[in-house]
Image (cartoon, coloured by chain):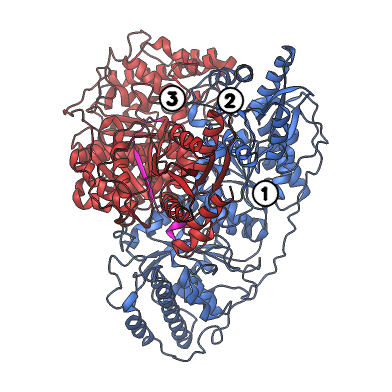
Chain colours: A red, B blue
Amino acid sequence: MSSVNAETLQTLSDIAHRLRIHSIEATSASNSGHPTSCSSISEIMSVLFFNEMRYTVQEPRHPANDRLVLSKGHAAPVLYAAWAEAGAFPLSELKNLRKLDNPLEGHPTPKLNFIDVATGSLGQGLSCAAGMAYAGKYFDKADYRVYCICGDGESAEGSIWEAMAFASYYKLDNLVNIIDVNRLGQSEPTMYQHHTEVYKQRAEAFGWHALVVDGHNIEEVINAFKTASEVKGKPTCIIARTFKGKFLPQIEDHDSWHGKPLGKQTEVVIESVRKLIKNQSDKLGFELLPIKTPTSQVNKNDLTVRLATPPNYKLGEEIATRLAYGTALVKVGQSNPNVVALDGDVKNSTYSIKFKEAFPDRFVECFIAEQNLAGVSIGVACRDRTVAFASTFAAFWSRAFDQIRMGAISQTNVNFSGSHVGCSIGEDGASQMALEDLAMFRSVAGSTVFYPTDAVSTERAVELAANTKGVCYIRTSRPNTPVIYENNEVFEIGKAKVVVRSESDYATIVSGGVTLHEAIKAANQLKQQGKNVRVIDVFTVKPLDWQTILESVRQTGNRVLTVEDHYAEGGIGETVASALLTNAPSETFNFKKLYVKSIPISGQPQELLERFEIDSKAIIRAVESF
Amino acid sequence: MSSVNAETLQTLSDIAHRLRIHSIEATSASNSGHPTSCSSISEIMSVLFFNEMRYTVQEPRHPANDRLVLSKGHAAPVLYAAWAEAGAFPLSELKNLRKLDNPLEGHPTPKLNFIDVATGSLGQGLSCAAGMAYAGKYFDKADYRVYCICGDGESAEGSIWEAMAFASYYKLDNLVNIIDVNRLGQSEPTMYQHHTEVYKQRAEAFGWHALVVDGHNIEEVINAFKTASEVKGKPTCIIARTFKGKFLPQIEDHDSWHGKPLGKQTEVVIESVRKLIKNQSDKLGFELLPIKTPTSQVNKNDLTVRLATPPNYKLGEEIATRLAYGTALVKVGQSNPNVVALDGDVKNSTYSIKFKEAFPDRFVECFIAEQNLAGVSIGVACRDRTVAFASTFAAFWSRAFDQIRMGAISQTNVNFSGSHVGCSIGEDGASQMALEDLAMFRSVAGSTVFYPTDAVSTERAVELAANTKGVCYIRTSRPNTPVIYENNEVFEIGKAKVVVRSESDYATIVSGGVTLHEAIKAANQLKQQGKNVRVIDVFTVKPLDWQTILESVRQTGNRVLTVEDHYAEGGIGETVASALLTNAPSETFNFKKLYVKSIPISGQPQELLERFEIDSKAIIRAVESF
């Protein structure tokens, strides 16, 4: 039985109805939105905000606070209403929902100081919540708890089940997932409608404590949270049987009411809901129910990071950039205890294993589940708890494109590293070759895309990424390649390096990674033939140092050749072309690009570079054809 | 008890060892690959190929054959060995594994006539297999069965669980998933090692019949398949407890042997395995064990598709291209009974619901699980059983990028449609806006990317996509926009349309979709100011009709402006810039591009077009700034 008295229960019920009304009013004012998806969780929200969660309204993202992730982001209005009722901002503001320049957007984003991660692409919130819970239990060793609300429809997303497996594997008993089983999806009933036993069975099979409650029964919801707080060694899943549009006459549990404001029915429905409120005073809310505050102290973290020791290589030494990535991870880890690394069971290939060996307690093995790997990374980095580096094969980051895209909207600072790029990986074949990763990561809003060419520049890329806001991507290669920079070379984001130059260069070659070395080879051979060429290492593909490139191109007869172990679309060639055309309207260019023109095959790395015409021979042919 | 006699059991065991030896020899010859991952499923493969599956070796992809998807594609050598033993090609060919230009690549691809879908990015095979099983049960109404082999490590992928839910929801009792629980992942033991009860509990919770067997016990494996064939109304999951590197001395069940050829140990290990073979004659294999043949007839399908009736709109009529997509789907569906449509619970937004209403038996609701939606689509289209159209919000195709990337390697002909692109969707906010989809689909190898501007061109895009090989993508928009083409307008892939022109055009504007209409508006206003501009509708962004664009640009003072409701990276502007620069080396261009420069916000569609400077006013400003 609940320890909550009848009066509190009534107040929580009243608050739930107020949240319901706010949601209806806001969506009617904006003439868009999802009032029925708000109504199904109004009681849950009331209990969370006014009976369960411990937080400071004045600083909603204080690190000691409990966290809430509304994975079913389309129910944003009820979340906004709860924060308004809690006192975070005036209730009157709710009617500006979805209006231009109002941060109360259609789906939650961290422009609001009470949102950690953007939601709205379904099935992603639980991974982020699991990351926060992991950080709380293992990094912060604090007692803050993490709550996540998922829809029943979105529970069809595999990413949910990746997160479910992760959370139980790591015994995240500070995590509660509430599944709002309101029976109705967008276009038809969900797969399992009100068969809550299906969700319970699955949650249990995935290692969670699971219980089914009537999601509109305040006392049952309170008791469920109490049970969750007492379960040790596993997370708890509260399966809440609810109704979409609960308490909205002629709308509750009706199909075809997804994502629709109530229009002409608004006033009648509100009137009906209002009658359910016992205490009609405006004093309801946090004034009546004190909000619980955090019980433990959690300090804010300094996230300044540097390489503990500078790169230490010999010029010409053959080192794969993926290996240098691992070395650099350890060094940034030495400089700051808040650096953490995550991987998807390829740590012995990406070399994040070196970090695990150095700092086993700061490494998170996420197994073969890249969507969850991305989401957990975003989660552990929230509220500046950690500087997170997540790695897998670059090709497999395509698995998590949606999570990374949402990560940008979430203002995440996670650093993603992808190894084994391009056909230069060799025998494994096309499925393992990233040939679209530059296109993908370049298209992520506000991203920085590093493509280091040797071990020295890779170490500096890691250091720069750690200190750069927004999504960073570090593209590393499988083959060993020679060190071309001195250990004290200084690198900057958006600054390319001219690595081969003379006073009489015939053309400029722009590249990065493995093909940059091919360009150097080509330049050496061309030089022997009496033809000098300039070679530029982009270092960052985004932002692109078009100024350096353009300057070089102008000094080399406006002949420019790009070379990349990547498909043409969205790659180095296109960004260089666009930059030249945009910034030099009165000039002509002799522009050529070399790239992987068709799906590669198995073969030895050098055979494939030759076959797909991105090796030194192809470069020489291209230069000679100018 | 099995109905198989002792002699057959022995032969199947002998074959398993032969497969094991072939896998070792092949990977040692190529000095790369995964022999230990082959050994764990050698008995299963022997039983499948020589006792269970019904197929014609001469025509491995005959539509009546049973299907096998090796989701754990890195075990390719044992799959190749099984087909060689079955007689598909000479055993001697196996030693050319992973060699340049040999189709026996590191991971399976359909360049081999016995492979339906490429695998190697883990966790994808089961969705494809489920699609094949769906086609068998509901479209072909045939009795062919579908087998899938997943690794235990890859069972952490959420896409597996999306497929598990889908298969039981649709009662795919013609589908068998074998999970090879060999305990070891790439870099460490799997999450559940040999706890087969975890897999059993999960499979059952996801609605499957599940049983655990010793995967190296031939009789148990045979009996499990027999049980599976008798289970009605649900798919069967065979959880096979196995050992990685089984029967390989000092390697079996040892960590750190993932993806490694045996090197110097090759001969000793092979000798040891060879001793396990009872019948040392070379006559083992299909000569001893007759391969079962298909029991029912399945015809090859004609997949020629056309619009049953031409577009029927009035010029100026306001129709969203997403609605025209739904209309066109019905029309191609009328022309050919093999057209099918799939969606992820947004059919009332993408308008694929019109197809469901017309042809309920040919519509597959995949619920909110886009990875599985993509995989099932690829599966139902295999062996030319269907012409598949899959739709969801364009933003959510980013969820399935890896599946679509692999789809290209699988030579799929699936047509993907994404609605709700760009900031023109309005109030829902950034999470729902596709602003990277052109970058993503352009980067898919061999893809065709349609960006139709009005209802007429959308209908033709659907018709053309249906008849085009490779991945096709149709980008549709949410807002209503006027019809600008006559109903009899002819469209071709790679052919742009000049929609506004005069003899004295000052500049060329290149666009598509919603922003094309803004360009027309701008052109009309500029005309009133006495300045004519040319407007080009790209129709297909890939392939880009650079010839028409270049010709127009030359006729308009080499001034060109691109406009797109998309981020800059990988979009229309970059592809146009790259094409101009590549194809006109002796010309200067005054090039500008308008695109969405930062993460959009909520607001009304027209407000957002204005705010993000891709509306007619921004276009006019850009033209005036030339």
Q: In which quadrant of the rendered view does residue A176 lie?
A: top left
Cα separation, mark 3 vs mark 2, equals 21 Å
Identify the residue position indicated by label 2 in the image: B424
- SS type, badge 2: helix
Q: Chain of mark 3?
A: A
Q: Does A417 appear in magenta?
A: yes
Identify the residue position indicated by label 3 in the image: A76
Q: Chain of mark 2?
A: B
Identify the residue position indicated by label 1 in the image: B340
> Which quadrant, please, contains the N terminus of chain B?
bottom left
The kind of residue tagged 3 is Ala
Residue B365 visible from this viewpoint: yes
Residue nearer the viewer, B83 or A561? A561
Residue at the (65%, 44%) spot, across then down: B543
- SS type, badge 3: helix
Dot 1, crowdedness within 10 Å: few (<14), some or many (≥20)? many
Dot 2, crowdedness within 10 Å: few (<14), some or many (≥20)? many
Highlighted range, magenta: A410-430
**Percent x, y for residue B120?**
47, 59
Residue nearer the viewer, B341 or A523? A523
Q: Is residue B444 above or below residue A442?
A: below
